[in-house]
Amino acid sequence: MAMKGTVHYEKRGDVALLTIDNPPVNPLSSGVRQGLFDGVSQALADASVKAIVMTGAGRAFIAGADISEFGGSASQGPGLHEVLTMMENSTKPIVAAINGTAFGGGLEVALCCDYRVAAPAAPVGLPEVKLGLLPGAGGTQRLPRLIGAEQALQFILTGDPIPAPKAKALGIVDEVVDGDIVDGAIAFARKVVADGGKVRKIRNESARVAADRQNPELFANARKDAARRMRGRFAPEMIIQCVEAAVNLNDFDAGMAVEQECFRRCLSHPQREALIHLFFSEREVAKIPDVPRDTPVKRLQSAGVIGCGTMGGGITMSFANVGIPVTVLEMTQEALDRGLGVIRRNYEIQVQRGRMTAAQLDQRMKLITGTIKYEDLGQADVVIEAVYENLNVKVEVFRKLETICKQGAIIASNTSGLDIDAMANATSRPGDVIGLHFFSPANVMRLLEVVRGSKTSKETIATAMQLGKTLNKIAVLSGNAPGFIGNRMLAGYSRQAGEIILQGATPYQVDNVINQFGMPMGPFQMNDLVGLDLGWRARQLAGVKPEDVPMTARVADKLCELGRFGQKTSRGYYIYPEGSRAGQPDPEVVQIVEDTSAALGITRRPIEDSEVLKRCLYPLINEGARILEAGIAIRPCDIDIVYINGYGFPEVTGGPMFWADKQGLDNILNDILKFRSEYGDFWTPAPLLERLVKEGKTFASLQG
Ligand SMILES: NC(=O)c1ccc[n+]([C@@H]2O[C@H](COP(=O)([O-])OP(=O)(O)OC[C@H]3O[C@@H](n4cnc5c(N)ncnc54)[C@H](O)[C@@H]3O)[C@@H](O)[C@H]2O)c1
């Protein structure tokens, strides 16, 4: 098999120029490693070469390791460590000309060079932590020696890239070069040669780590921060141990051995596989089999939003945040003023927290225009309604939009689960109608469910998926079925939570089990946040008789009768002390739950945590299987992405469908059948689940 990628060798006077060429982003594939090894050897053997410059062809320097070589078949060519050792032993100075992206192994290559110069727009980063890994080519050892442990930890633990000027300020690069980066790097190299040709091996530097040795609390702080931001993650602790080794061992090779061991532990940890699954899934969900990549996409340069409530306000901010002018419509001036006020306050909080400047606040507010006149939406390229969740109200809004939206405008609904076709058919242009289901808070949450109606055109779908990207969201396509993907799955989860507490658990036990699993909020914490009164009021409006209220809604309705609507009234399932979002359990609620069980004639019994977990999570899997079979979600990974980005499912599990495969679908099916015999037909297994088990297959086998 031919090796992948190559490195061009060229002489520019007394400088050897190595250009890494492995389109599109120059990952460190076999041919690149071989080429670097050969190129440096050749330059060292040529007495007329005084210095070496290394750069990338195209727009990247080196985007990182070749992920396709991970965990799989043995790769060809020299290992990266062999190449790096050889570079580090070079007696001639090597200058990295960082022309573009230098991520992961790419930055580690640059750290083995003696000097680094970068183009102003080149981002550098060590994103390994996001894949459950750590920089395993010396990054955890060299970076602390270069910039100190505190900054190195921050940089490696967030995994976020930084622009070259910031990298210069931190000391990661020596110079930012305007103009041609290769010319700049060659000039830099010649200057080094003129000054005596000094090499600078980071491995030999000890001043920074010696200073850090006096400051052991920096590791305690890093651990505290990691526990807060990346709860339950394995890689961060491994990274901290590596940097500790860099600081405390004072022996580069001993530190490298620790890094190797920690890297190996990350590599074999199940979280790594799950996180890499998510990495690929995020790219996969953009692919829609019947909407080819070259489908024309409309340019969306202005937007309209209808309703400036919780969702409308957040959607409006999402547009303003990416510089798209947006007009937001409300029913009355009063409601409009209130909605715009909330938007401004949200931005002000960001300014207070230092996430935004006052000037940026002004810029964003200038992009937002409020109105109470529909005509003002006539020129918008896309209009999204976010009015009350009531089909009649929405159909009415669509009828109006039909008369005022310009031809070709995308007309969208943010409904949480109502029929997109019913809205589309209220217009004469159903091809332009689509669901754009944002999640609360819409300016923060990454997920966007894009819902295709039966007549939605391919151009509209492609444009909506592109809009997701423009708004920095991750768009997943769903079919038009009640609840779409996410909320449809959620229904069974919520119902089980409601049943379990009537049978013997407390809401606190259920939430605790779900929190332990890694979701930031359990079902009852979530209900308190959303507001228990929503369902209660809806039932009252619909005139549901007390005896017809679903069993699982009775506790919530009783709480509402006591004025306990959740966080907004400081009481719901939990009590919220003044200004706190962390609820405390309340014996009164336990009493209400027990009384409700008694009134329904249910004998309470202890329910084990393991049963609680299965009964909450398996409905997600079972319904997920139905959603797949019905073609509502294209692939299992689409469901994983929805549930992780919209519902707080822990990333380290890889999502519900990936997680289910790891549990063993046969085990899950056995439990589901057992639950059916105990609790009834809710637990009828999805035909797809039964079929996969019978054939000994996994959900992953459906990925194609
Ligand atoms: N709240 C959530 O978590 C969430 C999440 C996803 C989707 N949604 C969906 O978003 C939509 C809005 O929900 P919300 O939570 O923002 O509700 P909300 O009550 O906070 O806001 C609705 C706003 O729409 C305005 N409005 C109502 N009818 C209107 C009309 N005919 N013309 C103009 N404005 C009108 C109201 O004055 C109100 O300000 C619903 O369809 C809901 O299902 C909500």
Image: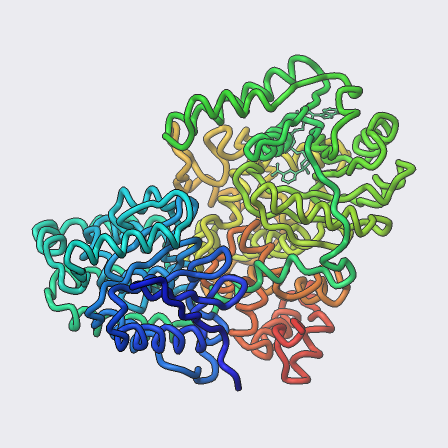
Q: Residue at x 70, y 69 (%)?
A: 684
Q: Quadrant of residue 204?
A: bottom left
67 sits to left or right of 657: left
Which colour style is shown?
rainbow
| Left or right placement of residue 381 versus residue 606 in this view | right
Q: Position of residue 22 (x, y in %)?
A: 50, 68
Residue placed furthest toward the bottom: 1
Q: Residue furthest right?
A: 428
Across and down, in percent, residue 687 comes to 74, 73
Residue 226 visible? The answer is: no
For the point 84% across and 25% down, the residue is: 404
Q: Position of residue 352 (x, y in %)?
A: 38, 25
Residue 281 against residue 356 in the figure, above or below: below
Q: Residue at x 39, y 48 (%)?
A: 119
Residue under the point 55% across and 68% down: 658
Q: Quadrant of ligand 1?
A: top right
Q: How many marks?
A: 0
Q: Can residue 201 be seen from the camera position used here? A: yes
Vertical placement of residue 461 versus 57, above or below = above
- Up the image or down, 621 lies above or below 120; here it is below
Q: Quadrant of the C terminus?
A: bottom right
Determine the residue located farthest toward the top in the rendered image: 333
- Expressed as whole percent of the image width and height from the top left, the position of residue 667 reads 56, 77
Classify residue 90 as left or right of residue 698: left
Q: Is residue 316 left or right of residue 382?
A: left
Q: In terms of depth relative to the viewer, which is nearer, 417 or 617? A: 417
